[in-house]
Image (tube, rainbow, N blue to C red):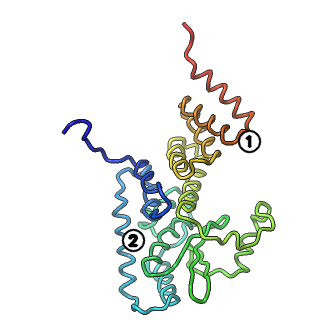
Amino acid sequence: MTASLRLHAPSALEYFATLVAEDEGLNLLEAAASIAQDDHPELDVQAVLHEVDALAQRLRRRLPADAAPSHRLRLLNRYFSEELGFAGNVNDYYERGNSYVHRVLATRRGIPIALAVIYLELAAQIGLQAHGIAFPGHFLIKLHLPQGEVVLDPFTCQSLSREALEGALLPYREETGDAPLERYLRSATPRQVLVRMLRNLKEIHRSEGDWPRLLAVQQRLLLLLPSDATEWRDRGLVLEALGHWRGALADLRRYLELRPEAGDAEQIGAKLRALQARDTPPLH
C-alpha cells in the first residue's frame, strides 16, 4: 500500500470534531462519552453506547406497548434512581470522573449533567420527549407530557415545583436580574450540553493548575464555539503557560480581533508584545 493510501485511526479530537460538526443529528451520548478519551485514550465509546442500549432494552421489555407517557416516566424514574442506583456524587463532587459518562455508568455516581445525559438517552429510547435544562448551578431535565411539562432533578428523579425552582434561582438573582423563571427552563441543545460539560471540566483543571488537561478541554470547546472570543483567549493563556509561544500569539490575536473593545484588551496587548519578543529570533 502506498503512503498516500494508508489510513490512520482518528485522534480523540478528530473523532469529537466529526461528532459535533453539524447540529442536525448530533448524538449527545456519543459525543459526551468521547470527552473522556483525553484522559482514557483506550476508551471504547461504542461499548459505552451499547451498555446504555442494554439498560434501555431491559426497561422497554417491562413496558406495555400502549403504556401512557406518565406510566413510562414513573417506571423510568424508579428504574434509574432505585434499581440502577444512579445518584449525585456528593462526597466527591469535583472529581473529574463525575463528568465522564463511562465512569458514571460504572460507579452510578456523577454530577447532574452527566447523570442527565444517560437519563435523556433512556427516556428517548422508551418514547419520552425529554431535554436538558442548563439551569444555573444545577443541570435539570424537562419532560413533555400530554398534561404538561415536568422538571426533574437528575440527582433524585424528583419533580420540582415552580416554587422550588424559584427558590433554587434565588442565589443567582444578582447576575440574572429580574428575568422570568421561564428563561432558565428553556431546552438546551446537545451542543449547549456539551459546552457546559466541558466548562465544568475546565474549571476543575484550572483550579488544579492542570494545564495539559485544560488545553485538551479548550481544544474541544473551540470546536464547539469557534466564534467565542473568551475561549480563544483562554486557550491562548493555557498555551502560554505551557510554553507554546506561537500558538498563544495566534490565539490572543484572534481574541482581540473578535473583541477589540474587551475590558482586558490592554493587558492582553501587553502580553502579546511580550510573546512577540519571545518568538522573535535574535539578530546575528
Question: Which of the 4 image quadrants contains residue 66?
Answer: bottom left
Name the kind of residue labelled 2 in the image: Val
| Res. 227 in view | yes
Q: Residues within 10 Å of mark 2 (few under 14, many from 20)?
A: many
Foreground pick, 54 / 108: 54
Residue under the image location 71 percent in, 72 percent down: 168
Q: Specify the quadrant that holds the C terminus.
A: top right
Q: Position of residue 190 (x, y in %)?
A: 52, 64
| Res. 111 in view | no
Q: Which residue is mark 1?
A: 262
Report the residue that reaches farthest toward the top: 284
Secondary structure at badge 1 equals loop
- In the rendered view, does 252 fall on the left or right side of 116? right
Q: Which residue is mark 2?
A: 52
Foreground pick, 5 / 266: 5
Foreground pick, 93 / 80: 80
Name the kind of residue labelled 1 in the image: Ala
Secondary structure at badge 2 equals helix
Q: How many marks?
A: 2
Foreground pick, 87 / 33: 33
Question: Which of the 4 image quadrants contains residue 152?
Answer: bottom right
Residue under the image location 67 percent in, 65 percent down: 136
